[in-house]
Image (spheres, helix red, strand yellow):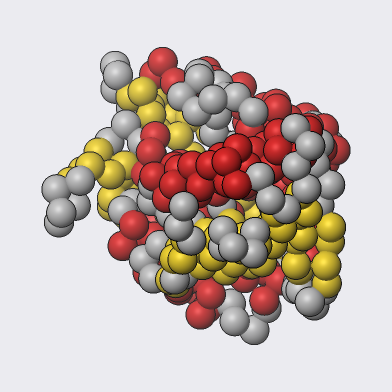
Amino acid sequence: MENIHIEGKHGVNFIPTVDFNVETGVCELAGESYLEDTIEFYTPLYDWLKQYTTEVKKPLIFNFRLRYFNTSSSKCIIDILNILKRYEAAGGDVKVNWYYDADEEDIEDELEEIEDFMIETNIKINLVPN
Amino acid sequence: MNTAENAYQMYIDLIDSTIISYNGPFDAQVLSVIAENIEYSLSNNPRVSKKLFKIFIELAQNISYYSAERQKNDEGNLYGVGILMLREFKDHYSFSTGNLIEKKHILPVIQKCETINILDRQKLRQYKRKLRNMPSGVPGGGNIGLVQVALTADYPLEYSVVPVDDENSFYILNVRVNKN
C-alpha cells in the first residue's frame, strides 16, 4: 500500500492538497476543494481509506485543513467521515481534527457546517483553532 | 421624462450598479475568471467577498449542469448557458442569474425554492443534511447547492419563471447579501 500525495492547486479548479501516510496513519486534506469532477478526484481517497481500515488496521488521524469547499465536495467529506465512522465502530482507533482559522470572517458558518458533519455521520470532530 | 431619456437613465443606473455581467456557457474557465473578479472587486470587504464567492460557485454550477440551453466550449465539452449579474446597491449586493429550463422541471425547481424560503435556519440545515444523504440524480434531491445559497445569503430567494416557448421557460433567481 502506497502513500498518497497530491499537490493542491488554485487554478481553474481548486484542488486540495492531499497527504495520506500509511506508515504514520496521518491523513491530511488541506486548502480549497472545488473541482469539475469531484467524485473522480475523491474516489481513490475512499479506496485508500477502505484499504487502510480493513488491511493495515493501525491508528488513523484525519486532519482537515480546508479553507473552502463547495457543496459537491461536502458530500465527499461526508463519505470520508462515514468510512472513518465504520472503522471506529469496528474497533479502529480514529481521531478526526478540523483545523480552523478563528480570524476567518465567516467562522460561524464554518463551525455550523462542521456541526452538520458531526450530526450527519455521528463521528466526533475535534475543533482545533490555528 | 421622455422614452429616450428614460432608457438612458436605465442604462446609466445599470452601468453604475453592475460589477460583473456575463452571458454565455458556464464552463470551468469562465467560472474561474468570474470568481477571481469577485475576489478582486470586493477585496475591501472579505466577509462579503467570501459569501458572494460561495454563492457564485453554487449558482454557476447549477447553470452549468441544469440549463436547458447547452453550448460546446473550445474543448468540445457541453456546458449550460445562462446569464449572471452581480450588482451593488446602497446597502446590499445582488446576484441575478437566468437560464432556460425545460417545462417539466419548473415545478420541482419552484417547489424547492418555496420549501427553502419557508424554513428557518435550523430547519434549513436539517433539509440540507437530508438532501446530502440522497444519491445524486434523484429527482428533487441530490443537489444541495441552492440550500447552501440560502444559508449563505441574508434574504429569502427571489425567483420567477417566464414562459418562452412550448418546451422551455426562463428561470430567474435573485440572491441578496448585506454589505454589513
Left of B17 or right of it: where is A37?
A: left
Relative depth, front residue between B80 and B92: B80
Residue located 66% across and 45% down the image: A57
Spot occupied by residue A24 in the image (x, y as percentages of width and height):
64, 64
Residue located 65% across and 54% down the image: B176
Relative depth, front residue between B87 and B41: B41
Whether residue B75 is visible: yes
Total number of numbered discs in the rendering: 0
Res B117 → quadrant: top right
Left of A57 or right of it: where is B29?
A: left
Q: Quadrant of the C terminus of chain B?
A: bottom right
Q: In the displayed image of the protein, which residue is found farthest to the bottom? A: B44
Q: Is residue B86 above or below residue B163?
A: below
Whether residue B156 is visible: no
Spot occupied by residue A72 in the image (x, y as percentages of width and height):
53, 44
Residue located 79% across and 76% down the image: A130
Res B114 → quadrant: top right
Spot occupied by residue B50 in the image (x, y as percentages of width and height):
63, 67
Residue located 50% across and 20% down the image: B138
Q: Is residue B125 above or below residue B174?
A: above
Spot occupied by residue B26 in the image (x, y as percentages of width and height):
33, 51
Q: Is residue B84 above or below residue B65?
A: below
